[in-house]
Image (tube, grey):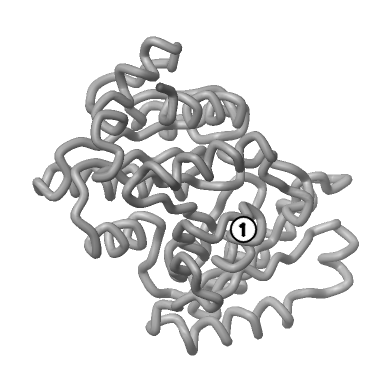
């Protein structure tokens, strides 16, 4: 699809999803997790996918050619959170691939040594001052994330995280900002879009749908659009999840938009409706 973003009503859901629903065996369903399948919460460890959403995903996995959850979390953590073993998981923003039935994800070999350096950096900057600001560290495989959502003084916490970003860049590491989170990453180009493109290159499919809510999901939007422009996919549907904190581009670059995780659940139901 292309053109202006449209809010999803029931009728529009069926219109947008018609090519996917017509031939599900040759379609990919690709989904971000946090903010898409699971509501954003102050503590990432407390996030969860509802049983209603899981039930829909299980049915989608039985019907569609390829289903994958694409997350900033490590792939194994993403699978534990979604708790469906028959689908793919792209973790650490595409750096890891966990295949259905596998116990160990494959890490992009370019990241092996850099991942160690990222963790050493995280250990070095984890000071009492950081904890005083209620800045929380999250191990995301080859990425270390610094969250300040819910800090007593978010402005002061953000200033402290700005300092961490400067230190990371001085150490030759890459930084990436999200919704009240800084990620320190290896200085190697990888993102959700590249991970999706690599995964889809393994299979013969006609179309793909991607659903996401944040900056990192824009790479996925652009990747599937590029695959369509190159003639490798016949159709794509980019679904933006509206939220108060989400970037404007997630809606403006989408083909259609839904409101929050409830809207995503309605979209999943429409994918399998008879």
Q: Is residue 214 above or below residue 268?
A: below
In this picture, residue 177 sits left or right of residue 18: right
In this picture, residue 162 sits left or right of residue 64: right
Q: What residue appears at the point 61 percent right and 42 percent down from the top-left corner?
A: 54
Q: Is residue 70 above or below residue 166?
A: above
Element under disc 1: strand
Residue 114 spot, x, y in % from top left? 49, 84
Q: What residue appears at the point 53 percent right and 78 percent down from the top-left corner?
A: 104
User: Looking at the rendering, in which quadrant would you find the N terminus?
Assistant: top left
Is residue 251 or residue 62 the one in the foreground?
62
Residue 157 spot, x, y in % from top left? 78, 53
Residue 22 spot, x, y in % from top left? 25, 29
Is residue 156 or residue 81 the one in the foreground?
81
Residue 210 appears in view? yes
Query: Which residue occupies the extreme left position in the image?
Result: 231
Q: What residue appears at the point 61 percent right and 58 percent down from the top-left corner?
A: 182
Q: Is residue 20 above or below residue 182?
A: above
Residue 161 spot, x, y in % from top left? 69, 59
User: Looking at the rendering, in which quadrant would you find the C terminus?
Assistant: top left
Q: What residue appears at the point 61 percent right and 37 percent down from the top-left corner?
A: 53
Number of numbered discs present? 1
Query: Which residue occupies the extreme bottom position in the image?
Result: 113
Q: Which residue is mark 1?
A: 182
Residue 35 appears in view? no
């Amino acid at each position: 699809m292309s053109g202006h973003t449209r809010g999803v009503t029931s009728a529009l859901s069926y219109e947008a999803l018609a090519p996917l629903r017509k031939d599900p065996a040759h379609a990919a369903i690709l989904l971000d997790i946090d903010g898409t399948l699971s509501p954003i919460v102050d503590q990432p460890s407390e996030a969860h996918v509802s049983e209603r959403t899981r039930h829909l995903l299980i049915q989608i996995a039985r019907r569609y050619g390829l289903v994958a959850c694409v997350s900033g979390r490590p792939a194994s953590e993403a699978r534990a959170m979604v708790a469906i073993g028959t689908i793919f998981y792209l973790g650490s923003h595409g750096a890891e691939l966990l295949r259905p039935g596998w116990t160990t994800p494959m890490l992009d070999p370019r990241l092996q040594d850099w991942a160690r350096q990222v963790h050493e950096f995280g250990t070095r900057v984890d000071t009492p001052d950081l904890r005083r600001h209620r800045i929380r560290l999250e191990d995301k495989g080859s990425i270390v994330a610094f969250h300040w959502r819910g800090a007593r003084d978010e402005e002061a916490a953000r200033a402290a995280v700005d300092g961490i970003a400067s230190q990371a860049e001085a150490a030759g590491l890459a930084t990436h900002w999200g919704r009240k989170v800084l990620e320190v990453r290896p200085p190697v180009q990888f993102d959700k879009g590249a991970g999706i493109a690599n995964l889809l290159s393994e299979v013969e499919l006609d179309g793909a749908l991607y659903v996401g809510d944040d900056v990192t999901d824009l790479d996925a939007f652009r990747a599937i659009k590029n695959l369509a422009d190159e003639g490798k996919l016949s159709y794509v549907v980019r679904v933006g999840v509206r939220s108060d904190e989400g970037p404007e581009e997630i809606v403006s670059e989408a083909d259609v938009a839904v409101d929050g995780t409830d809207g995503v659940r309605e979209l999943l139901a429409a994918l399998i409706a008879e």
